[in-house]
Image: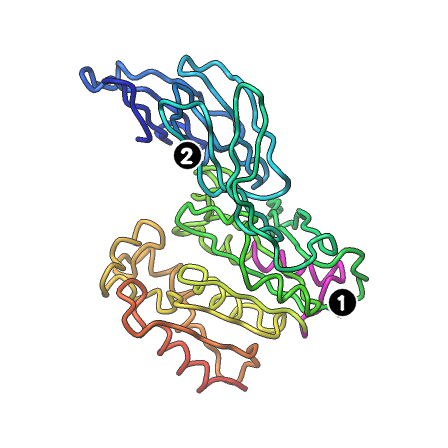
Amino acid sequence: AFGNVGSMLYLRTDRGAPNRKVIAVNVRHPEPSAWTTIVPEGKQAIETVSLISGRLVAQYLVDVQSRLSLVGLDGRPQDDIALPGTGSVAGIGGRQDSPEIFYAFSSPLFPTSVFSYDPASKKEMPFEAAMPPVDVSQYETKQLFADSKDGTRVPLFLTARKGLPLDGSHPAMMYGYGGFSISTLPAYRPDVPAWLELGGIWVTVNMRGGAEYGEAWHKAGNLEKKQNVFDDFIAAAEYLVREKYTSPSKLGIMGGSNGGLLVGAVEQQRPDLFAVALPAVGVMDVLRYDRFTGGRAWVTEYGSSSDRAQFAYLVKYSPVQNVKPGACYPATLVTTADHDDRVVPSHSFKFTAALQAAQG
């Protein structure tokens, strides 16, 4: 639910619509037969919706890039808001008694800035715009696509200095998450400009498991299909090497929580492809994660080793159980938090000990 007009409640839902739709429910007659579809499901996934001054502001993802569309409460399309460039919208806000729409926009090269948009004049203005810490005219962000093991087209965003010679000599850092229906958008991180100034390449990968292409994209990367996530990330790395953006001796990978699991699993499966691995607060013992704190809530995403059929695929990728003695693993820095009550630190402790014992 994201807003109401009187007794009419407006909701974004994926019920019967993997790419999501907007419905209206009269709370005085809440039975499903009385629900009204305001914005039907389309080809692009609806990421978020806001209700501002009697109109809907819907954020769509078009190949993982944000698009803002205005829609009347009668479902009629109005206008699209032209965004400042390739990037993502982090938030939409406004009031019921004012038509002005505020949204936060960022990209790998631009710190998050709030823009105001006037639907009448169709003009937008930055609101105390942040200043980039580097001369961003020297750099660019471009979207690329890699073909995964099963032929699935996987998007990635690459930020680097313009005119970069493709000779495989550049250090590159890949970031990913790939789970829980969470989209990894091309957004700003304060450490990236420093990395770019040092000659580095920054890459974010949009693997299955996220919501970049709706719920179907999520379902294609969870439970027994989790290996697709790792295959997607590996395919992106192979693409960067093949196109000579970087080389295995210059390639690092990083991610946290579910992304830490990603890094742990991928460095097990393809240790030859990476020089450095930075798993943060990773779910490293996938056979026992549901025995501790909030882990039981993730069973719908991973499955549980208590189930014989699910154990069969979990044991194949669980990082702690797949460390191979004598293998040459990437230089690995494992980070965790000693009071983390979500991904308990024992995951990282066990993974570190297993790697230290096995490293050839």
Q: CA distance from mark 1 to mark 2?
A: 44 Å
Residue 346 magenta-drawn?
A: no
- Of tags 1 and 2, the one toward the viewer is 2
Q: Main secondary structure of the magenta part?
A: helix
Give the amino acid at mark 1: Gly
Q: In this rendering, is residue 126 above or below 34?
A: below
In what element is the residue under mark 2?
A: strand
- Magenta range: 232-249
Provide the residue designation for mark 1. Answer: 168
Residue 346: image location, x then y, percent: 31, 74
Classify residue 80 as left or right of residue 145.
left
- Residue 149 is at least partly visible in this image: no
Identified by mark 2, the residue type is: Gly
Task: Please name whichever residue, 294 or 140, is drawn nearer the observer in this view of the structure.
Answer: 140
Residue that badge 2 annotates: 93
Quarter holding the C terminus is bottom right
Pinpoint residue 150: horizontal percent, then vertical percent: 59, 49
Tell me which corner region of the image, top left, top right, bottom left or bottom right, holds residue 352. Answer: bottom left
Q: Height in image: 95 above or below 286?
A: above
